[in-house]
Structures are given as structure tokens and as C-alpha cells.
Image (cartoon, coloured by chain):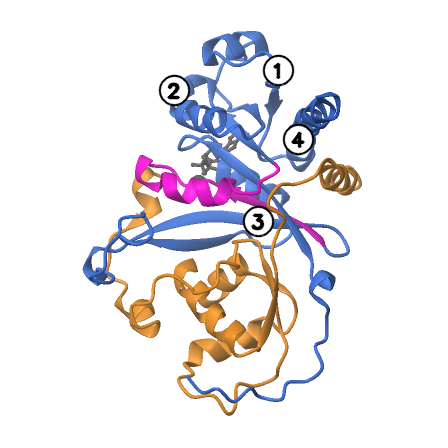
Amino acid sequence: MSSIVPRGKTPPLAADDLPQAVKILVAGGFGTGKTTLVSTISEITPFHTEETLTRASIGIDDTSGVELKATTTVAMDFGRITLRDRLDLFLFGTPGQDRFWFMWDELAAGALCAVVLVDTRRLPVSFPSIDYFERRRLPFVVAVNSFSGSRAYPVETVRAALDLNPDVPVVMCDARQRRSVKDLLISALEHALAIEERAAAREKTS
Amino acid sequence: MSDSDWVDDGPLVRPYALVRGRTRARHDVFDLVAFVVALVDTLQGWIHIEPEHTRLLILCRKPVSVSELSAGTNLPIGVVRVLLGDLLDMGAIRVREPSERPSPQLIREVLTGLRAL
Ligand SMILES: Nc1nc2c(ncn2[C@@H]2O[C@H](COP(=O)(O)OP(=O)(O)O)[C@@H](O)[C@H]2O)c(=O)[nH]1
Ligand SMILES: [Mg+2]
């Protein structure tokens, strides 16, 4: 590659004048409302982006290069909300299927917290998401999406069925309602903040 | 959306030919939510410039996230990262990475912003 550096214009922005980004993950099994939730609150048309699974990206050391024939793309939903000047919140709907765990790791890195959507008619489809965030110790809340035709169960019944840690909030939500989604994200952040503050207090006393 | 909508097992020869089999960017700085902005108007004077480099440069005249660059160019994230790495090497862009571990202060700022929506 050429080594001639083009004479660019004066940099228009210092690095920290660039927006700061934070992210929240939206997980849950298929059909639990992830795509709906992201589009309800996003100010941009939710994008659909893709990552390609190659041997390299799943961590297998392969010196023979990329296997062009064997690529698989994984699509993700994402949306963005401008919170204030130069502070942007991104929402990522996590891809399903076990073979995409490597993508979850990337999404979870540096995330503030997560929301796990559940449909009471099909709770087990959301079990892997819960297991994942527990293992990863990423603060999460469970959102019971209110689908028409589903019986309304008390929150405590859902909590017991999911075998949740007592401090994990379980909240009702309608992924189609902006207000409801906003309240859900606030609960998730308050939960994450409480955990961070407890950790900070422990660090001080020890 | 069904399970199979997530995957497309078709070949992706073009994007990977574009980055000549390079699957990993030399720079580990392009998080999905990293923001990028152009520092130059054109890539004149450089060799090995693909049209996609220029497309990316145009898209980041205003600060834009890596995810949106992928969506905006229809290129997989991995390919966008490699191309952005080239642009970074050329001094054509600047990047801001998200913080690795959000501080309580940052979470509070996000809460304030969300409540005000
Ligand atoms: N009644 C009701 N339907 C919903 C709700 N959220 C999503 N849906 C519907 O459920 C279906 C699956 O939602 P989708 O967002 O695609 O789920 P995903 O697979 O998790 O992305 C769609 O037809 C939505 O319109 C909700 O809160 N209430
Ligand atoms: Mg979906």
C-alpha cells in the first residue's frame, strides 16, 4: 500500500467529540417480540445487519484462509436512540440459534444490560437467553410480553417457572407500545445501576 | 420471523474477494457501536483503493456507527472492519470506541436521557 499520506483537511472533530455509544441487548426466543421492540423505540428505521460466520470468526485457527463456500450470514436487528448531544443508545436484537453464541459475546461486551422477552405460552424458548446472561453476569430483566390470547400470569408465577434469582426484575411489557418499551429499558438500567453501585460500595469497604 | 430467516447459507464471494481473504482487521477498534468520522474528503493518491473504501468514506462525513456503516453498504461487519482498518491506516478516519465497562455515572446519564424521551 502506498505510504504517501494525503494532506487531509484539519480534523473536524476531536476523538471525544465523536458520539459516545452505549448498548442494551434484546434477547428471548423466536417470536417473543425482539424485532417489534427494537422498531417501536428506535429513531432510525431499524437496520438489519449481517455478520458472516467463517472459520476465522468462530475462533478455529485456520491458516488456509477463508472458506468462501462455507460462509453463513447471521442477521441482527439494531436500532438507535439519541439520548442527548453525543450520547447514543443502541439496541441489538440478539440472533437466535446456538451456533451464533460467538456473536452474542461480541454484542454483550461493554453492554449496559439486557432485556429477555418471554411469551408465557412458550417460556422455554427464552431459557437459553436467561442462562447466557446469568453465566455472563450481565444484568438483565425479564419482560413478559403481553400477546393477545395468552393468559395473564402473575409475575411471581413467571419468576418461579423461570427459576430466577430473586433480585432479577420481572416486568410486564407490550413491545408495540413505545411507553411500555421505554419503561422496560428504564427498569433494566435501574437494575444494572443498583448492581454497579453495590459493586462499587463493596470495592470501597474491602 | 422463523429460525431460518436468520441464516443465509449462500456464498459471499464478492465481499470477501474485496478484502482479499483478510478476515480480521489489523485494528481491534471497530466495535459494532464505535463511531467513525472522515478526516479527508477523498482518497486520491492512494493505490489499492476499492470503490467500497470511497463509499464508506462518504458515509462517514458525519459521525456514524460501524453497525450503520454495515447496514448502509450492505457489507458484512467483518468486511466493513477490514476496510475501515485500511482507512484508519491511511489517516482518513478517526474512531471512538465505546467504554469497555460502563460506569455508574454513564448508566445514570443514560437513565436521565431515556426518562426525558
Ligand atoms: N399482541 C402482541 N403481539 C406482539 C407483541 N410483540 C410482538 N408481537 C407480534 O408477535 C410476532 C413476533 O414478533 P417479532 O418481533 O417478530 O419477534 P422476534 O422473533 O422475537 O423478533 C409479530 O407478529 C408481532 O407483531 C406484543 O407485545 N403484543
Ligand atoms: Mg426478529
Which of these two is toward me, B22 or A121? B22
| Marks 4, 1 in one chain | yes
Q: Quadrant of the C terminus of chain B?
A: top right
Q: In this rendering, which labeled residue sits more in front, label 3 or label 4?
A: 3
Q: Which residue is mark 2?
A: A124
Q: Dot 1 falls on which chain? A: A
Q: Is residue B95 above or below residue B101?
A: below
Q: Nearer the viewer, residue B80 or A3?
A: A3
Q: Which mark is residue A79?
A: 3
- Label 2: state its secondary structure: helix
Indicate left or right for B35 with B48 as reference: right
Question: Does A21 sit left or right of B72 as displayed?
Answer: right
Percent position (x, y) of residue A21?
A: 64, 51
What's the residue at 62%, 15% (across, down)?
Answer: A167
Location of mark 1 (residue): A167
| Disc 3 to disc 4: CB gap under 8 Å | no
Residue range highlighted in magenta: A87-112
Q: Is mark 4 within 8 Å of ligand 1?
A: yes
Q: In the rendered structure, which disc, 3 or 2, sits on the residue that comes first in sequence? A: 3
Chain of the residue under label 2 = A
**Helix or strand or loop: what does disc 4 sit on?**
helix
Q: Looking at the image, in which quadrant does ligand 2 appear?
A: top left
Q: Residue at x 41, y 44 (%)?
A: A103
How far apart, in angstroms, are the residues tagged by discs 1 and 2?
Answer: 21 Å
Q: Nearer the viewer, mark 1 or mark 3?
A: 1
